[in-house]
Amino acid sequence: MHFTRMGVYEDSEVPIIVRGEGCYVYDEHGKRYLDGLSALYCVNIGHGRAELGQVAAKQAEELGFYTNWSYAHPRSIELAARIAELAPGELNRVFFTSGGSEAVESAWKLAKAYHAARGEPARYKLISRRLAYHGTSMGALTATGVPALRAPFEPLTPGGNHVPNTNSYRWSEDRDPLWAADAIEEAILFEGPKTVAAVILEPVQNSGGCFVPQDGYFQRVREICDRHGVLLVSDEVICAFGRLGHWFGALRYGYQPDIITVAKGLTSGYAPLGAMIASDRLMEPFLEAGASFLHGFTFAGHPVSCAVALANLDVFEGERILQHVQATEQTFRTALEGLYDLPIVGNVRGAGFFYGIELVKDKETRASFDDEESERLLRGFLSGALFEAGLICRADDRGDPVIQLSPPLICGQEEIDFIASTLRDVLTEAWRRM
């Protein structure tokens, strides 16, 4: 199993999820769980959508697979056009992948190839943020800013540089709210502007616990990138397709990227598919006679996955999923902020249906748990207790200890109330034990 301490199952059974319906999943014993993580930030329209399975079956019957290498097929053409319609500005070129890491990998390769085609082959470096997670393939892992994930696989692809993130909960009160944006310019100048290809940022940073941007952050970053001829990549593998109440996080926060990377919610997890969405100008060098973007994946733009994605977007539009998130997110936030009376809850942050709760051992000083305490708190108690209570979410310490919530976008008051009450009970017991 991926990212799993396999040894823990020597004396306990592996949780086997056999069925899903709406916001809930069921294990092999018939026990029901609220899927507070949308499987892995994926199942945005909820589980058990038979219509998506029917679309997949119909497509497999018509054309199960054909490659996008020198060919095209109707579903990938239709889906690319629809994504281009939704994407901001002139992001009209869609390069399909099988998932998120591949989308990030493709974005970095395109940035390097684009600069090289324009006579600047020295531009190969990538700037990302500390604690940010951008994937596990070797290029994407270089962008990832989580030391524990990187260390076992070093040396990594050269060219990565990491700057501070936007976790203002850990900032001094007198700090300039845009200092983290300005740190990107400092990194570009330090590396040498003519060597930097791109900056890659999530609209809301997942790893570390849903760090939101300060007002004006992305506008400042856009100015910095433009000043130095650097491309801006918005990594929206999690944030796109409704997670923040908009088609793309860039639309929510009002900035124009050169590239957007997506996956997960594009099909609501019903089939594997990702994409890199690029501006028209980035494709121009590759439209010239004899030119080619020498990159691709066998199953990228798979006909069945594209058909599922199109059906998924139909559900979004037909059931007004984005409008539901926008109308409900304050209710969700208010329910989580209601936990502030618990001594262990230090900070609630996030947007849309994407929240992190940072846990502390002293609210006044914001003192965090040390490594041993965090291990005991998260893995020794919280993860198991929340699951036992019927709530699937993430208890994580890539950074300070947090609980992350990312439920299906169809959640309503009943699910929100269950999340809040379950967290209250389990966190109260966690504090007593600690």
Image (cartoon, helix red, strand yellow):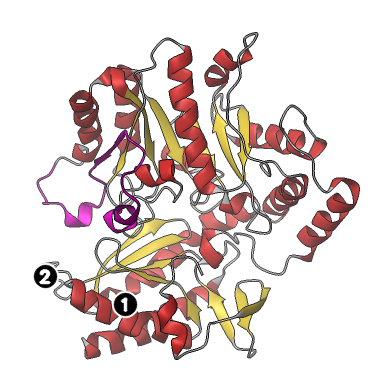
Horizontal placement of 8 versus 410: left or right?
A: left
Left or right, 18 with reference to 339: right
Residue under the image location 25 percent in, 52 percent down: 167
Which residue matches tag 2?
364
- Say few, some or many: other residues with alpha carbon within 10 Å of mark 1 (under 14 / 14 to 19 / 20 or more): many
Residue 171 is inside the magenta segment: yes
Which residue does the image show at 33% across and 85% down from the upper left? 381
Q: Residue at x 56, y 70 (%)?
A: 412
Task: Give the residue furthest to the right.
Answer: 62
The residue sitting at 30% across, 89% down in the picture is 429
Q: Are marks 2 and 1 in contact (CB under 8 Å)?
A: no
Counting from the top left corner in percent of width and height, residue 46 is at: 64, 65
Across and down, in percent, residue 89 comes to 54, 26
| Residue at which label 1 appears | 378
Q: Is residue 340 above or below residue 262?
A: below
Amino acid bearing label 2: Glu
Is residue 216 something one can see in this rendering? Answer: no
Q: Secondary structure at mark 2?
A: loop
- Provide the residue span drawn in magenta: 146-175
Secondary structure of the residue carrying tag 1 is helix
* Relative depth, front residue between 340 and 350: 350
